[in-house]
Amino acid sequence: MPRPTAAQLAYGSCTVILSTLAMLLLSQTSSAAGIALIAVAALALGLLVALAVPVRRAAVPRTAPASPAARRAAQEPVGAASVSDN
C-alpha cells in the first residue's frame, strides 16, 4: 500500500478536527457514548476525504509519436508474424 501524501494527511486531519468540533457543538452531547460515536464518525469521514484526494502521479516523459507502421506492429499479436498463409 502506498504511503499517503502530505495533501492527503492534511485534508484528512483537518476534516477529522473540524467535523468533530462541528458535530460536538451541534449535538450538544455530554455522554461518553455520544462523544465516542462522534469521534468514530469523524475518523471515518477523515479517512474518506483523505482517500478521495487525487494522488499526483510521477511525470512520464512523452516520446515522439510512432509511425503508422510501428503502431501496427505494436498492436499485432506476437504469434501473428510467424504464421504463414498457405
Image (cartoon, rainbow, N blue to C red):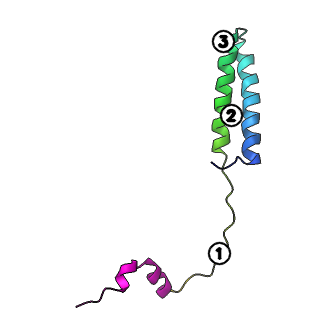
Image quadrant where residue 15 sits: top right
Q: Can you tell which mark lies on residue 62?
A: 1
Residue 82 marker:
none
For residue 79, side relative to residue 69 (left or right): left
Q: Which residue is drawn at the image coordinates 48% and 81% (left, top)?
A: 71
- Residue corresponding to mark 2: 46
Crowd around label 3: few <14 · some 14–19 · many ≥20 (10 Å): few
Q: Which one is in front in this view, the residue at disc 2 or the one at disc 3?
A: 3
User: How much space separates mark 3 and mark 1, taking CA atoms?
Assistant: 55 Å
**Which amino acid, by three-letter code, is at mark 2?**
Gly
Residue 41 is covered by the magenta coloring: no
Q: Is residue 1 above or below residue 77?
A: above
Residue 41 placement (x, y as % from top left)? 64, 25
Residue 64 location (% of width, % of height) = 62, 82
Pointer 2 or 1: first along the chain? 2
Instruction: Say what amino acid the circle numbered 3 marks.
Output: Ala
